[in-house]
Image (spheres, rainbow, N blue to C red):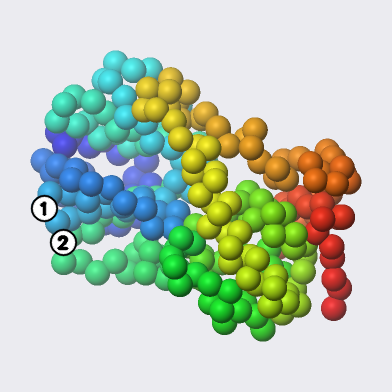
Amino acid sequence: MKHITVRRPEVVAHPSSDEFCKLLTGQSISGMKRRGKFLGVSLDSGDYFMLHLRMTGGLLLTPPDYPEEKHTHIIFKLNNDYELRFSDTRRFGRFWFLQKDETDTYSGVAKLGMEPFDENMTADYLQTYYGKRKKTIKECLLEQNVIAGIGNIYSDEILFTAGIHPRRRADSLTEHEWQRLAAVIPERLAYFIDKNKITPNDYLQSRGKDYRNTPFLQVYGHNGQPCPNCREIFCRMVIGGRSSVYCPSCQKDMIF
């Protein structure tokens, strides 16, 4: 990287923004990986940096003369003169730089639970962590320390496909429902990953805002519309401060 510009120092959570720029300048990117909702960028030196986009963050790889997005907070000037730009309207997104032998006690990645595609993410695993919880199953699915990566949109899609009401207490689920949930979680996420595929050029032209999964969402955002399975009208409720849409017919509620 030739040069790094940080316009909003608070976006860099570790170390200071000045040190972040100093340590990254002259380094080369060797690879990228995902852990939960975090993106890790590996460097040839063995150093790496992590980022979390939060609600409104986005990355764009652009030619140097490409029109800049509003709320662009960090610009990485690459060796080929392209720019990797980070923009974020609400400024909740964060970056963390870690040197080769430095322990990451900053980003929270170490606290993440199992990946949803892990072969050990079974009904037994879910029951072990959730089976005695009085919390709603919707809130449980959003806990990143048990399953990493499930957010509000896909928790609604998962519960709809599994036929489980989002307000159900976790300790009310049956053995069969746990098995169904364990099967549906990776299936639904894989489905939407496939639907979200986009070419680099299309991604750039849409400025990273081409939400390709939207036409394929069955329940999220469909409050007041008919269920595709039974034609009952979708309902909305707030659970744990998060909006939840469900079918009152396909997802029967059970109050305990």
Picture coordinates of residue 139, whole percent (x, y)? 66, 65
Q: Quadrant of residue 115?
A: bottom left
Q: How many marks can you see?
A: 2
Q: Image quadrant for the N terminus?
A: top left
Whether residue 18 is visible: no
Picture coordinates of residue 237, whole percent (x, y)? 80, 54
Q: Residue at x 73, y 75 (%)?
A: 173
Of callouts 2 and 1, the N-terminal one: 1
The amino acid at mark 2 is: Lys
Q: Is residue 156 left or right of residue 10?
A: right
Question: Which label sits on residue 45?
Answer: 1
Q: Residue at x 84, y 62 (%)?
A: 252
Mark 2: few/some/many CA within 10 Å (<14, 14-19, 20+): few
The amino acid at mark 1 is: Ser
Q: Is residue 12 left or right of residue 44?
A: right
The residue tagged with tag 1: helix, strand or loop?
A: loop
Q: Quadrant of residue 66?
A: top left
Q: Are marks 2 and 1 in contact (CB under 8 Å)?
A: yes
Q: Residue at x 12, y 49 (%)?
A: 44
Question: Which label sits on residue 108?
Answer: none
Task: Please give the residue where the numbered disc 2 appears in the rendered image.
Answer: 100
Q: Is residue 136 left or right of residue 208?
A: right
